[in-house]
Amino acid sequence: MNKYEYQIGGSLKVDAPSYVERQADFELYNALIKGEFCYVFSSRQMGKSSLRLQTRHRLEQAGYSCASIDMTRIGNGNITPAQWYKGIVVDLLRSFNLFNKVNLKAWWSEQEDLPALQRLSQFVEDILLVELKTEKIFIFIDEIDSVLGLNFPVVDFFTLIRSCYNQRAENPEYNRLTWSLFGVATPSDLIADRNCTPFNIGKSIELHGFNLSEVQPLAAGLENKVANPIAVIKEILAWTNGQPFLTQKLCQIVVQERNSGSKDIQEQRCLEVDERYKLDNHLPIINQHLINFYYQFPLLILEKLVQTHIIEKWEAKDDPEHLKTIRDRLLRNEQRAGGLLGLYQQVLQGIQIACDDGQEQIELLLSGLVTKEQGQLVVKNRIYEEVFNQTWVEKQLAKLRPYSQVLNAWVASEHHDNSRLLRGRALLEALAWSQGKSLSDLDYQFLAASQEFDRRQVETWLEAERTKEVKARLLQEQKAARFQRLFFIGAFGWALIVVLGLGMVTFEYKKHCPGISKQLLDQLWTKRNISK
């Protein structure tokens, strides 16, 4: 009975038949034996924990002392620095089986006057290097990225690791001690100070997907299930690009479908039989029963299995979670999600993006969605490309952007339709929304074009208003001048009428009353003479 099992997710046991040795296995083991500080940083479900277990097993088989610390067990919530460092000491005692040799409670109390970091340093030097007699001591720290969730800085912890290597010059005992870190992070995420970081004296172990020359252990699980295991594995790798989780999952799906005698496989065989014989009648096989056996698992059926078991309605079928993990890492930070999605959209569209180790590129690489190939970012595999396709990206961006519809219309017009650009209040709201966020290049282009267009529109409006104001002022002045002219004309007219009227009155008066005037004058003259 074949007891071979594929394992989807989790750490593989050291004797798991489906464990695939990669270049990283040899690089890590050899570097540790040389006493080099090593770190394995990559996206989730790439086999880091399994690599750690296998390497530890090999070292223990060679007679060395090893300890593993899972940082998630110590916690990253409401925990004090003293509790955190003491948790590390507890895990070291447990892993090295030293509880029966060290009274931790008494020893820790004796060191209470020292800072927590110095207690850990003293523990390494006074306990580990003294009690462990083996030639070499290895400490593996898994899930190191969990320290990013602590409410206090742990720069000193990484400084301690560096000091263990610096101490080798003064204390040869430290040559026996070697550290290695595993996690989903970058050195700059964990410690920014280049003077304290241990990473500039360490060795980075690159963890790549499976390649065809390494997958014989996986092909063994398909023996007696398909006629040509290597051919099936090759097709699986064409879909997964060697991503460990997906590769194991597809292998298991093939075995399950083969064991269940899937109707899909039988129907596909019937559809392909004539074409197969036509294509392969050059083979040195004349027995049609052998030919039928050779094709008992048509390779074209694999695409249907991928579609039905992984891609179609993937959110409901993603168990154990893998694709959701990628999705959540992309979208978990709303401030940065737009930038990540925009960058991934460019990669998806085939735009050449040179690797520059920018923050967004690093985050996208750590999500596992993309990888580096010849200095360029590319989508990691066909499954990711079909799940996280252009439609999915646009849907997510539409949820994030308050201006998604007009942006898409502007893009559809090849950036020519200015009526789709934002103006006025809509632009101000979009700019306020964008503050503090990392957006895609397309977003920045759209907002910049909107600002420029809005500026030109405002300038045009202001110019029109100024022109209107000048015209209104000129018109007012013309009206005032006309009114002034009319006033002067009117006043002159009235004055002329008055003068003419007075003249006529005087003329008439003199014409009709000359005697009366002479008599009055004589009377006035007589009165004047009398008064004298």
Image: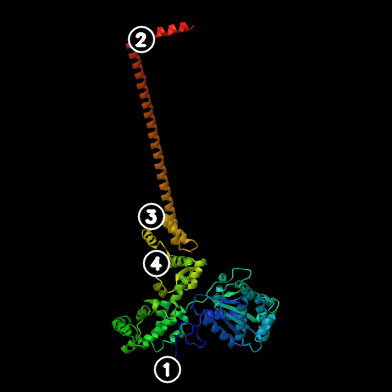
Give the residue pinned by disc 4. 394
Q: Residue at x 44, y 54 (%)?
A: 451
From the image, state whether disc 1 or disc 4 is nearer to you. Answer: 4
How far across and down, in percent of the image, does residue 449 sit?
A: 43, 55
Q: Secondary structure at mark 3?
A: helix
Q: Residues within 10 Å of mark 1 (few under 14, many from 20)?
A: few
Tell which circle, 1 or 3, labels the residue nearer the N-terminal end. Answer: 1
Return the residue nearer the eye: 210 or 50.
Answer: 50
From the image, state whether disc 2 or disc 1 is nearer to you. Answer: 2
- Look at the numbered discs 3 and 4 and tell me whether their residues touch, using CB distance below 8 Å: no
The quarter holding residue 403 reads: bottom left
Q: Please tell me the numbered disc located at residue 418.
A: 3
Q: CA distance from mark 1 to mark 4?
A: 49 Å
Q: CA distance from mark 1 to mark 3?
A: 70 Å
Q: Is residue 481 left or right of residue 145?
A: left
Q: CA distance from mark 3 to mark 2?
A: 95 Å
**Residue type at tag 3:** Asn
How far across and down, in percent of the image, does residue 93 sit?
A: 62, 85
Q: Is residue 452 left or right of residue 23?
A: left
Tell which circle, 3 or 4, labels the residue nearer the N-terminal end. Answer: 4
Give the residue pinned by disc 1. 1
